Amino acid sequence: MQLHGSLDTFVIGFQPDGLFRLFGVPTNELTDCDLEAHSVLGSTITRVAEQLGNSTCFSERVRIVEQALVPRALRCSSTDAISAAVSAISAARGSAGIPVLASNAGISVRQFERRFLQQVGIRPKLFARIARFEAALEHKVRFSLRPWSEVAHEFGYYDQMHMVHDFADFTGVTPSETLNQLEAVYVEQIKSLREQKPASTAEDPVRLVF
């Protein structure tokens, strides 16, 4: 979306298993669905929506949401084996092996895949593909002069065509077209990415959130 004019809005970004941990809702039941929030989260979210609708102050809206979610976050279960696996896949840029993750969790591969699907909403192999795709795209955004063939090799694709197929699956266009679209929309964010220190040394590295 390209928005113009004055707009006050904020977004709550959950960790991949965050919605499950906060509300206990099997996330796979929500995947690729368009549902009313109250039908999934109940009266709590209905009251929050009413309060937000009655408020005309931006800071007040933030406070309303924080009052609803922070106490729930403090009461929710601590991170478990699936949360650890999500972090491991993201840190490994999608290259973590599913059998190894299942072994680390102390469960069978089948149990691991079932729990991952329930808590994250997609299967671990698809999550790993997405993590690799996002890492590769963000790397290219940072280092725009680097050839796509080198990016494909660095992020573990069989070859450049393998990467092209993943981009087509996730964006519907080629890697170069995806990059052009990002550069047209996220102008300031990309400028910050390219001007900052390398991610390994930056104190507070900028991330491009898709």
Image: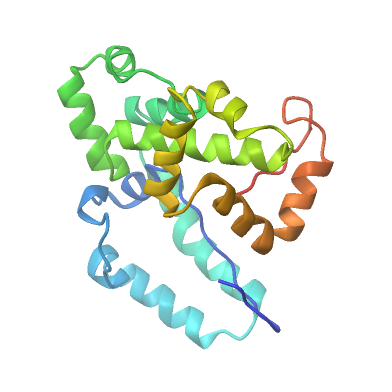
Where's the N terminus, which quadrant?
A: bottom right
Q: Residue at x 48, y 38 (%)?
A: 133
Horizontal placement of 120 versus 28: left or right? right
Q: Is residue 95 above or below residue 134?
A: above
Image position, residue 55 (x, y; %) = 56, 84
Q: Is residue 137 above or below residue 102?
A: below
- Toward the viewer: 45 or 19? 19
Indicate the colouring scheme.
rainbow
Q: Residue at x 27, y 15 (%)?
A: 99
In this view of the protein, can residue 99 be seen by the observer?
yes
Image position, residue 196 (x, y; %) = 82, 39
* Quarter of image, res 144: top right
Q: Is residue 61 above or below residue 33?
A: below
In this view of the protein, can residue 78 be seen by the observer?
no
* Quarter of image, res 50: bottom left
Image position, residue 23 (x, y; %) = 31, 52
Q: Residue at x 51, y 87 (%)?
A: 54
Q: Is residue 61 above or below residue 115?
A: below
- Toward the viewer: 151 or 18? 151
* Quarter of image, res 148: top right
Horizontal placement of 185 versus 130: left or right? right
Image position, residue 167 (x, y; %) = 45, 44
- Toward the viewer: 129 or 16? 129
Count numbered badges in the picture.
0
Q: Residue at x 66, y 72 (%)?
A: 59
